[in-house]
Image: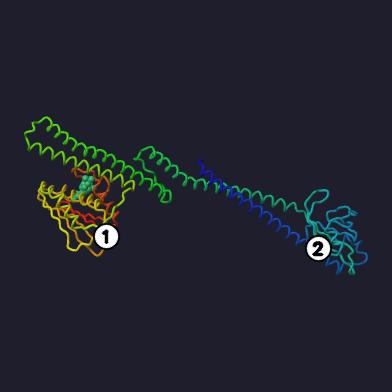
Amino acid sequence: MSGIKVRLVGSYLIVILLTVLFLEIALIFSIRYYYEQNIKMILASHAEMSAHLFERYLADEHWEERSAELLDNFSLHTSAQVQILNASGRLLQDTNGLPSNLSFNRDPDVQQALAGEPGSWKGTMPVTREPVLAVSYPLIHHGQTVGVVRFVTSLTGVEDAIQTLAIVLVLIGLMVVALVAAISWFLAKTIVGPVIDLTKAAEKMAEGDFSVRAKKRYNDEMGKLADTLNLMVSQISRSEQLKNEFISSISHELRTPLTNIKGWAITLRTGKHDQRMKLEDGLEVIEQESDRLSRLVEELLDFSKFEAGRIVLRKEPLHIPELLMWLEKQLKPRALRQSLIFQVKADDQLPVISADEYRLKQVLINLVDNAFKFTEPHGHVYVHASKTEEHVIITVEDTGIGIPEDELPHVFQKFYKGTSNVAGSGLGLAIAKEMIKLHGGQIVIDSKEGTGTKVQVFLPY
Ligand SMILES: Nc1ncnc2c1ncn2[C@@H]1O[C@H](COP(=O)(O)OP(=O)(O)OP(=O)(O)O)[C@@H](O)[C@H]1O
Ligand SMILES: [Mg+2]
């Protein structure tokens, strides 16, 4: 049995054992008390009646000589032992035939009756050691106590009955205890079982087996824990998968430009340098590919900074139209190369915002880079800045291939690249989202497969 089970069953048992014990003791004592009081009352009423009868009708100077007759009278309606004692406590008559001359003046009930008051006593008989209850009343003649009438009954029957009752009660108590033990054992099992299951599952997960799932037995706290554990492991395995995909895609991303650069370097070294055009072409490719590599490294660095929470914005007053003009100048050549129609427009009277220029440029380059990457030649890419009451909105819109509906919710996830085979680490939008969030703004993407994509950046002013 496990620790929790022992504790649960043990504590239940202790509580129920104590309860049963106290109840039974209280019950036995009160039943005994009730029985004895009852017997005492009956004896007292007989004794009282007898004493009364004596005082009214039977008392005279010579009553002691008629004591046998009196005894018959007094013992008429009772099965108890009846005794008549004289004024000094000596036995005159006894229904059990005890020899006269025995003295009872030591018994407390007799002493009390001799003093003129009714008395009772519970004790054991001197010879038989039998438990008895005795009630004595004074016999009065002319206001004088002349003798005592005593009713004595054995308590053996009562003791026996109470003993039987006690045995029955103890048996019932044991049954209750056994029942509670069984119930609490089952109860403990329903608690401990899921814990053991969860522990086993968690152990497997800790060993790196992400295919296991914790079993959910009940819809309670334990069930919730199982759900949480399962959710956790699926998140872990998902990020594990993303990590692996990332490593393979990043290796690919690094290899392609490196191969190009190396290829051209070899060509240029071994080739004859008179071909001026070829030299130009080669150098251009090398330059572009180096740019691509540094951008990739830049993104990776940013990303790890994000993960460590070490990005700090350097905010300065920023003129949106100037920013857009810079963007146009940067990207126009590429648009021309890709035969894309690239338009940039800023509304009049845009407010100056406070932002980190370098970071914002990075975001916009990312967005336009996406638009260029996913738009066929002769498509449109349109960048537009406008304002609302509280925000400046920079919109990057394209007429490209769009994003399938089921991919749309994931595009902001790090390393997510959808089904596209186009070059990229899948970090661009994730970084953009973090940057805009740091600026207190918001980035919203809207897309329709086959029609185009619209990304809006909201920046507060
Ligand atoms: N304008 C767009 N048109 C179509 N699909 C897009 C567009 N922008 C983003 N996506 C989809 O969202 C994915 C994630 O974009 P994100 O910019 O985060 O990564 P990436 O462009 O693949 O890589 P990186 O930006 O790091 O070079 C893209 O791979 C693409 O599937
Ligand atoms: Mg991108």
Query: Circle 1 is placed at which residue position?
Result: 460
Q: Residue 210, position in %: x, y?
A: 34, 40
Total count of labels: 2
Amino acid type for the residue under numbered disc 2? Ala
The residue lying furthest to the right in this view is 61
Q: How is the image coloured?
A: rainbow
**Residue 14 placement, left or right of 245:** right
Please say whether residue 403 is visible from this viewpoint. Answer: no
Examine the image and state in which quarter residue 230 appears: top left
Q: CA distance from mark 1 to mark 2?
A: 107 Å
Q: Residue 102, position in %: x, y?
A: 89, 53
Q: Is mark 2 within 8 Å of ligand 1?
A: no
Q: Nearer the viewer, residue 249 or 44?
A: 249
Secondary structure beneath label 1: strand
Secondary structure beneath label 2: helix
Residue drawn at x 41%, y 51% as measured from the top left:
219
Label 1 vs label 2, nearer the camera: 1
> Of the numbered discs in the image, which one, if any, rests on residue 70?
none
Examine the image and state in which quarter residue 419 appears: top left
Compare marks 1 and 2 and give the one earlier in the sequence: 2
Q: Residue 75, position in %: x, y?
A: 81, 60
Please say whether residue 127 is visible from this viewpoint. Answer: yes
- Number of residues whose C-alpha sits closer than 10 Å to that of mark 1, classed few (under 14), some (14–19) or many (20 or more): some
Query: Circle 2 is placed at which residue position?
Result: 47
Q: Nearer the viewer, residue 439 or 141?
A: 439
Relative height, residue 268 to residue 89 (above, below): above
**Residue 121 placement, left or right of 22:** right
Amino acid type for the residue under numbered disc 1? Pro
